[in-house]
Structure formats: C-alpha cells, structure tokens
Image (cartoon, rainbow, N blue to C red):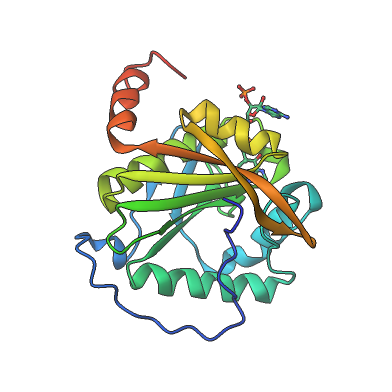
Amino acid sequence: MEKMPYQPDLDRPMTIAKTGSDVTSDWREALPVLTGSRVMLRELELSDAASLFAMLTPEEVSRFISPPPTTVEGFERFITWACAERAAGQYACYAVVPHGMTTAIGLFQVRQLEPGFATAEWGFAIGSEYWGSGMFIDGARMVVDFAIETLGVRRLEARATVANGRGNGALRKLGAQQEGVLRRSFLKNGVHLDQMLWSILNEEWRQAKAVWGNGVLH
Ligand SMILES: CC(C)(COP(=O)(O)OP(=O)(O)OC[C@H]1O[C@@H](n2cnc3c(N)ncnc32)[C@H](O)[C@@H]1OP(=O)(O)O)[C@@H](O)C(=O)NCCC(=O)NCCS
C-alpha cells in the first residue's frame, strides 16, 4: 500500500475520534503480541524510532512507498500517532522484531477503509538486510490472521506500485489475488504511478490457512 505507512500528515495535530464501530476487542487498549517462527510482532514503542529510521529511510526501501519521516523525531511523532489511532479503533501498526533482537526492523499496518474494519488496507516495510529472510511471510501471515480474526476484516486490500517487484511478489506469494491496475493512482516524486490492487478475502484466507497450517505450504 503505497499511501501508507506514513499517512496522514504526521506533523498535523491529531484529533482522536471514536468511530462508533462495532469491533469488539481489547486490541484498542493494546495490540496483542503475536509470535511466529522467525519474528515477534508487538506494539510500536517510542524507542523503536531510531531503528525504524535506520531501516526504512534508505532509498531501496522507501522508493515505492510514501516518504517516511526524515528524522528520528519524525518517527517518534508517527509512533505517537499510530498508538492514538489504535486507541481510536481505526488503525493498527505492528513492529517487526526478529527473535533474539529487541529492536524493530520494520512494520506492518492495517487501517480501516470503512467504520468497523469490514474493508481494510494493509501495508508493510522491512529493512533491506532482512529481505528474503522469511521474516516477511512469517509476520504477514500473523497480521492477516489478526486482521481477519480479531479486527473482523472481510476484505483486505493492498496497493503496490507496478514497478515494485518485491512488493508485488510478496503479495502474490502470500496468496493475495491481483484485481487490476489503478492507473496513475500514486504520486511519487511528482510523477503519478500505476498501482496493482490486491485483495485477500476472509473465506479464502481461512481455506488457505487450513492448508499451510497443516504444513503443506511454507
Ligand atoms: C515488501 C517487503 C516487505 C517484502 O519482504 P521480502 O523479504 O522482500 O519478501 P520475500 O523475499 O519474502 O518475498 C518477495 C518475493 O518477490 C519475489 N521478487 C523479488 N523481486 C521480484 C521482481 N522484480 N518481480 C517479481 N517477483 C520478485 C522474490 O523472489 C520473493 O519471492 P520468492 O520468495 O518466491 O522467491 C520488502 O521487500 C520491503 O520492505 N520492501 C520495501 C517497502 C515496500 O515496497 N513495501 C510494499 C508496499 S506494497
């Protein structure tokens, strides 16, 4: 999702409004910790700002996504904003922490596209030294599962710039369905780029999970 992870404008003062959604879970109080085979996913902490700055600002990571904050302080403001949005029940952002480490090497986020999360959009970015390590798929499966089973997402969308080979490859590998091209939908460096639209439906996900959950697909 190219409009995330850094939207909306982080320098703008936040108004926190309850949505009136019927999502019932204490995830609004604090995100549950999710533990996979390679990574742990947990709530963002202010102390993640420096490592996220180091991981997500290099050109190879940020070239296809909205510009990340340009300072550690900017990441601190983003983390504060993310926690407030979670408390408001409209957004969830997970830090990716490899086993054996305490610092975040990336993030996954999910935002509602309508009150109540039935339709939502997700996005992700991790430091390039961890690409191809299996950490993405480990974390991604847990986040999709969290979105569907806890947030109540029925349709989970992702957008990836057509030229983003890894982003599109990662979504395909996860089992997302490619729905089409959103022409000239993403403004990057003054140029409007085409994006692929991907989706995962809750019933498809549950079927797929029954397969890989039994060790058939890794
Ligand atoms: C997107 C991201 C989180 C995926 O993590 P990752 O560790 O690179 O993902 P993986 O290596 O598990 O999967 C990527 C897949 O795309 C494939 N791939 C790589 N380049 C590709 C290309 N040019 N065309 C098609 N597929 C490609 C890889 O081979 C891999 O598939 P495989 O495991 O079957 O070989 C990571 O690349 C990233 O942070 N990128 C920068 C931020 C970003 O673009 N976010 C996505 C916005 S939608």
Vertical relation: 63 (above or below) 37: below
Vertical relation: 16 (above or below) 103: below
Question: What is the x, y in percent for residue 48?
Answer: 59, 63
Q: How many marks?
A: 0
Residue at the (57%, 83%) spot, across then down? 12
In the visual, does 5 lie left or right of 189? left
Q: Quadrant of residue 91?
A: bottom left
Identify the residue at the far front of this view.
Answer: 183
Vertical relation: 20 (above or below) 159: below
Residue at the (59%, 55%) spot, across then down? 103
Question: What is the x, y in percent for residue 1?
Answer: 56, 50
In the visual, does 208 lie left or right of 4? left
Residue at the (67%, 59%) spot, across then down? 66
Q: Quadrant of ligand 1?
A: top right
Residue at the (35%, 24%) spot, across then down? 208
Residue closest to the eye, 2 or 124: 2
Question: What is the x, y in percent for residue 7?
Answer: 57, 67
Question: What is the x, y in percent for residue 215?
Answer: 37, 16
